[in-house]
Amino acid sequence: MKAAARLQLIKDEWADASLAEKDDVLTYNRKLWTILVTSATGAESQLPQDIKNNIASLGVFVFRQTVTVMSSDDPNKVTTLISINRAIAEGLRAQPE
């Protein structure tokens, strides 16, 4: 949730945020996703292959969306990253029944 909160803050303050501040938040998110994708898709991961593939595809989308955000001056482009991060965080926090 920390990454989503930081993304939301930078979106809300987009006009006043410096390029360095935006880059810092997006770099943090990219590092988080690099760790997630690497851990979930590695050979030692016990996740089913279809889940590994889905996480890898989602990771590629997040990385591409990050580039899109950085090359755009539209703060609404960050919304997709915020939504994905929140959905993943909620899923990871959910208790199995």
Image (cartoon, rainbow, N blue to C red):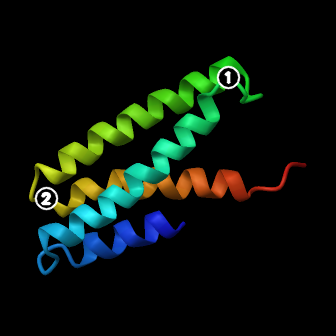
C-alpha gap between disc 2 and disc 1: 38 Å
Query: Callout 2: 10 Å neighbours few (<14), some, many (20+)?
Result: few
Q: Is mark 1 on a helix, strand or loop?
A: loop
**Residue furthest out toward the right:** 97
User: Residue 3 in the image: x percent, y percent?
Assistant: 45, 64
Total count of labels = 2
In this figure, which residue is indicated by the disc labeled 2?
74
The picture quadrant where one finds residue 19 is bottom left
- Residue type of the residue flagged with mark 1: Ala
- Residue at (44, 55) in percent of width and height: 83
Query: Callout 1: 10 Å neighbours few (<14), some, many (20+)?
Result: few
Q: Is residue 59 left or right of residue 88?
A: left
Q: In this view, does 55 lie to the left or right of 68?
A: right
Between 79 and 61, the one lying in front of the other is 61
Between 94 and 30, the one lying in front of the other is 30
On screen, residue 79 above or below 16? above
Foreground disc of the pair 2, 1: 1
Q: In this view, does 33 lie to the left or right of 26?
A: right
User: Residue 46 in the image: x percent, y percent?
Assistant: 77, 28
The picture quadrant where one finds residue 1 is bottom right
User: Residue 94 in the image: x percent, y percent?
Assistant: 75, 56
- Residue type of the residue flagged with mark 2: Asp
Q: Is mark 2 on a helix, strand or loop?
A: loop
- Residue at (61, 26) in percent of width and height: 52
Circles 2 and 1 in contact, beta carbons < 8 Å: no
Sequence-first disc among 2 and 1: 1
Residue 43: numbered disc? 1
